[in-house]
Image (spheres, rainbow, N blue to C red):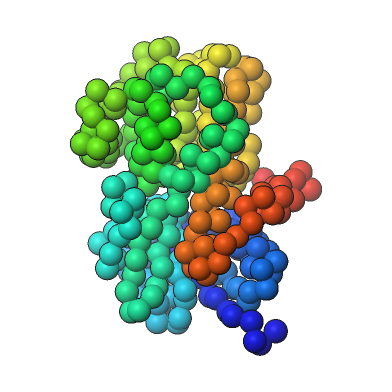
Amino acid sequence: MNSRKAFLVGLIGAGIQASRAPHLHEQEARALGLRYFYQLLDLERHGIDALPRLLDAAQLLGFAGVNITHPCKQQVLPLLDELSEEAAAIGAVNTVVFANGKRSGHNTDAWGFAESFTRSFGTVARSSVVLLGAGGAGAAIAHAALKLGVQQLSIHDVEEARTRQLVDNLAQQFGRERVQAVTNLATALAAADGLVQATPIGMVGHPGLPLPIALLRSDLWVAEAIYFPLETELLRQARQLGCKTLDGGGMAVFQAAEAFRLFTDSAPDTERMLRHFATLTSPLKQEN
């Protein structure tokens, strides 16, 4: 046991006690013969202002890296030494690797969403898509969606300045004609093929609906970024209406797999991780 390589990693975010990340990472490490310890560093216990101190402590204690989640994916940027090309383009980080005395920021959310979407939704219509949320997860999903061929991405966030900033960033990379900020969700959804939900509303600690259900219709597909709970109220009601839906589980697994590779330089088995995730989110395992 002591001869196996060991890794200490963690997750920094607020309200993360229900996260399946420790089990998902540690189980895959065991399958690969690695010693791997995944710690939760919950900002609800320390406050958002503790983010710099937690990063300092993790680096000092020899962590291989940390995952970053709500509400820190953009706030962490000035605390890093370098960014991967994709993280810089997206403007958000969900994985920080400590190596050679430096902090390197990466974004595995975009690939995680794209992989899950492609596997589950295949060739669904994507001429016009509405995205709720312009934060860290929303920024990653927006990049993924445009790379997946979405022709018109309409973005809505309660913070209009954040929406405009994301739209301007995307317009520079993908063209102004393919992205817009919207305030009238009813009008945007009436012309949309699909909806992607990337706000915290619906996750553990943030119950509720991010929009009026009356705006949905049965021929609209609905994708969720949240994975705890796996079935949010939005997904439950969308399914009742007959919408094709995608929960956040696949994105969670695929982004975790890529983060695991960055931490360990070992290739995880994503199919095995998907199977393990399914056992963690089965009805007997659900915490909410």
Q: Which residue: 63% across, 41% down?
A: 230
Q: Which residue: 43% across, 60% down?
A: 95
**Residue 132 point in image, percent of width and height:** 41, 32
Q: Which residue: 49% across, 59% down?
A: 259
The one nearer the camera, 243 or 284, is: 243
In the drawing, does residue 157 fall left or right of residue 223?
left
Say which quarter of the image contains residue 203: top right
In the drawing, does residue 90 fall left or right of residue 114?
left
Work out whether 89 lies above or below 119: below
Name the residue furthest right: 284
Q: Which residue: 27% across, 33% down?
A: 174
Q: Is residue 96 visible?
A: yes
The one nearer the camera, 245 or 133, is: 245
Quadrant of the frame with the C terminus: top right
In the drawing, does residue 26 fall left or right of residue 133?
right
**Residue 286 point in image, percent of width and height:** 71, 47
Work out whether 120 lies above or below 7: above
Quadrant of the frame with the N terminus: bottom right
Work out whether 112 lies above or below 197: below
Q: Is residue 206 visible?
A: no
In the drawing, does residue 129 fall left or right of residue 243?
left
The one nearer the camera, 27 or 14, is: 27
